[in-house]
Amino acid sequence: MELEDIHSLFQNKVKSDTNQTVFLLSPIRKQLVEQVGTAIRFHLRRLLNPVPLTATNTESTKFPQKITDYSICRSRVHRLVQLVAGCDDRDSAVADGSISSVFNLALQYIYSYFDFSSNKILSPESTLAKSPSIDAIENYGLTSNAGITKTSSHHVFPAQFDARPVVHSVMKFQNVLATGKACKFIVDLLDWPGVLEAINDVGGWAPVEKLSVLLSKHQLDKICPEYAHFQILSNMHLFLETLKLSMTYIEETINTAEITLRTIWDNFKCGSKQKAWLKRYPFVVVIRDAILESKVVFPVLESPKDYN
């Protein structure tokens, strides 16, 4: 009966509340969106990642096995570029060479930042400059300045200083910063010499784009929001061109967010180890932890040494 109801909705496009409930909450539709999301992840791995290492012991003489070469199913991207973690960063995606995992994370930040309420494809009119989140840089900061005075060397805070607005501002700035870095990561990756050619050699973005269109066309993103960000991939050429057009603004945004976070860090002396300061202003630890724990680091890209 459920299949008949869904088929009727597709055929007749009935808009009643009851039918819409069946249409959106159907377990079959949930299975469909999970399959679409899984298929997109598969294609991203195929296009961006190396073939996973086999668990079979190829050196065994007792049980000799011939290992099938699946490299023909993957692109050459991993031979052109690799991920490198920062000096203080430990990233399992970097260790595994999983470019698709970082690519997926970047998409999630970009999707949450842009306005997709119209269900339209990403266009230059919906760039970072028009995102509400960018207001965080202009309208948020040390919003609890009431009662703060400044001596020649440092700020003096009231005894009952409320750090919550500052923490809220930190989270805003970190989100802006992470989104800017996400945009830069994707542009740097897809602009890397030979990357787009390598992707085209194994079929290009067409399978990903076709699957992405299904999410918005059949409102599947409303069933499983964790896959909603894949809608961005419905037109890869337009998506990449939009980011490129926005790069000057994105770089300015990154710079402004970094300066603002550094200002908050310095104003509250978050790096201080002086027990007297931390005892007098215990909220400093809260602000410091908020800055450090909400920080998002994207790996650096470089040419693999083995393929130079």
Image: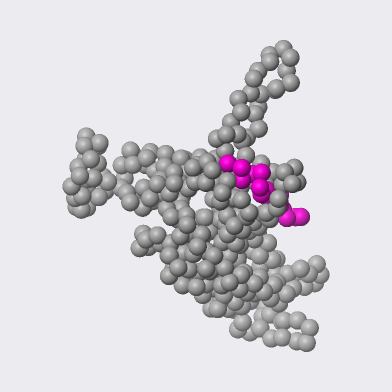
Q: Is residue 247 magenta?
A: no
Q: Position of residue 155 (x, y in %)?
A: 72, 81
Left or right side of 280 for 188: left
Q: Is residue 126 left or right of residue 19?
A: right
Is any atom of residue 108 visible in this view?
Answer: yes
Viewer-side residue, 197 vs 133 = 197
Asked whether 91 falls inside the magenta stretch, the response is yes
Q: Is residue 199 above or below residue 111?
A: above
Among the 4 quarters of the image, the one containing residue 167:
bottom right
| Quadrant where the N terminus is found in the figure | top left
The foreground one among 5 and 270 is: 5
Which range of residues does the magenta coloring cover? 75-92
**Front-lying residue, 280 or 93:** 93
On screen, residue 87 above or below 34:
below
Identity of the residue drawn at 43% across and 65% down: 123
Tell me what residue is drawn at x 63 percent, y 54 percent. Answer: 193
Q: Is residue 43 left or right of residue 87?
A: left
At horizontal 33% and vertical 42% (from top left) the residue drawn is: 29
Decide: is 155 above or below 278: below
Give the left or right position of residue 25, taking residue 248 as reference: left
Q: Outermost residue toward the top?
A: 62
Q: Position of residue 251 (x, y in %)?
A: 61, 70
- Please provide percent x and percent y for residue 84: 71, 51
Residue 178 appears in the figure? no
Question: Which residue occupies 68% across, 61% down?
Answer: 292
Q: Position of residue 99 (x, y in %)?
A: 61, 47
Q: Is residue 124 above or below residue 98?
A: below
